[in-house]
Amino acid sequence: MKKIIFTGGGSAGHVTPNLAIIDQLDQTKWSVSYIGSYEGIERELVEKASIRYFGISSGKLRRYIDKKM
């Protein structure tokens, strides 16, 4: 059996395309897992689809200079 891992989170806009792709995979040929944040909406959506989920620590990518850094 082949293994595939999807990732993405922060908003459902990153998760729903992954779920659509996963839905098209032959589950008898692919072992599917998902990596996302501990507390993001992706966890709820992925687990609802009965896909194995691994939570990780994550944060926002800063695209600006912050004096508090």
Image: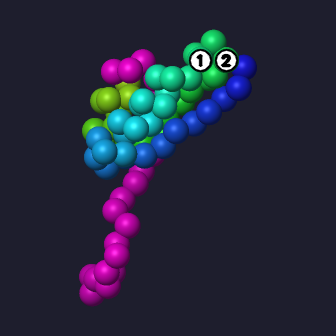
For disc 1, the neighbor class at 10 Å (few under 14, some 14 to 19, many from 20) is: few
Q: Main secondary structure of the magenta part?
A: loop
Q: Which amino acid does label 1 sit on?
A: Asp
Q: Nearer the viewer, residue 59 or 2?
A: 2
Instruction: Please give the range of residues in magenta.
Output: 48-69
Q: In which quarter of the image is the C terminus?
A: bottom left
Q: Where is residue 31 shown, x and y percent of the image? A: 62, 23
Give the number of marks.
2
Q: Does the magenta stretch include residue 57?
A: yes
The CA span between labels 2 and 1 is 6 Å
For disc 2, the neighbor class at 10 Å (few under 14, some 14 to 19, many from 20) is: few
Looking at the image, which residue is at 34% across and 62% down?
60
According to the image, label 1 marks what residue?
26
Q: Do the residues labelled 2 and 1 touch (CB within 8 Å)?
A: yes
Measured along the vertical axis of the image, is residue 15 above or below residue 62? Answer: above
Compared across the picture, whether 9 is left or right of 52 comes to left
Looking at the image, which residue is at 62% across and 33% down?
4
Residue 35's tag is none
Measured along the vertical axis of the image, is residue 30 above or below residue 36? Answer: above
According to the image, label 2 marks what residue?
29
Compared across the picture, whether 24 is left or right of 12 comes to right
**Residue 37 in view, yes or no:** no
Looking at the image, which residue is at 43% across and 46% down?
8
Q: What residue type is labelled 2?
A: Lys
